[in-house]
Image (cartoon, helix red, strand yellow):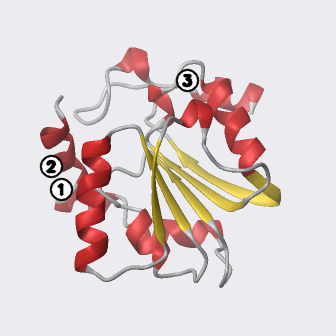
């Protein structure tokens, strides 16, 4: 799937209905000045709503510059000043140790191998007591999402993380 098609999928109204970002972000219990990190930020599905619930910085990390370019346009259109774009990988997050209050990992960790490397990086950048909001595709066939072999078996999460 190319980036244009991926962007179209990220912006589908059905996705927003199935995964309402404002409601999901409530699970992070964001405080007024929290600094957040959105892994695989894409076009800002979570970054933009997150920027509206904190006065802190929202770091939007993505490996695809084209995604970040689109997010930059949206940030400018909405006059948002607390999102910082970062081109980089989840396996090597270019942020300081203990600098983030909350991390959002929405349907992105199945792209990372091994996932333990990504989770170690998340742990490194999180402040003590920080939170990770993570959700992934179930390991069962469905019309949406990646192929079954790319999904992370839920028992692995329970056992190792």
Tell me: residue 49, above or below residue 148. below
**Residue 148 image label:** none
Residue bearing mark 2: 8
Q: Quadrant of the C terminus?
A: top right
Q: Residues within 10 Å of mark 3 (few under 14, many from 20)?
A: some
Q: Nearer the viewer, residue 47 or 84?
A: 84
Tell me: residue 75, above or below residue 31. above
Tell me: residue 81, above or below residue 7. below
Residue at the (66%, 73%) spot, across then down = 29
The quadrant holding residue 93 is top right
Would you say the residues marked 2 and 1 are in contact, meaning their CB atoms lie under 8 Å apart?
A: yes
The residue most toward the right is 128
The quadrant holding residue 44 is bottom left
Q: Is residue 28 left or right of residue 39?
A: right
Residue bearing mark 1: 12
Identify the secondary structure beneath mark 3. Answer: loop
Residue bearing mark 3: 153
Residue at the (22%, 33%) spot, across then down = 143
Q: Residues within 10 Å of mark 2 (few under 14, many from 20)?
A: few
Q: Is residue 56 left or right of residue 24?
A: right
Q: Nearer the viewer, residue 125 or 159?
A: 125
Tell me: residue 98, above or below residue 31. above
- Tag count in the figure? 3
Residue 36 at x, y = what percent? Answer: 60, 64
């Amino acid at each position: 799937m190319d980036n244009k098609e991926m962007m179209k999928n990220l912006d589908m109204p059905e996705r927003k209905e199935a995964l309402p970002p404002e409601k999901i972000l409530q699970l992070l219990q964001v405080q007024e000045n929290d600094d957040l990190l959105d892994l695989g930020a894409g076009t800002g599905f979570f970054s933009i709503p997150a920027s509206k619930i904190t006065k802190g910085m929202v770091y939007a990390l993505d490996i695809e510059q084209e995604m970040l370019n689109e997010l930059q346009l949206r940030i400018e259109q909405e006059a948002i000043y607390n999102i910082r774009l970062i081109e980089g990988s989840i396996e090597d997050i270019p942020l300081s140790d203990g600098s983030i209050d909350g991390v959002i990992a929405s349907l992105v960790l199945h792209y990372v191998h091994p996932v333990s490397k990504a989770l170690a990086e998340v742990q490194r950048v999180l402040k003590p007591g920080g939170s990770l909001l993570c959700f992934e595709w179930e390991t069962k066939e469905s019309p949406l999402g990646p192929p079954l072999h790319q999904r992370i078996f839920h028992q692995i999460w329970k056992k190792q993380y």
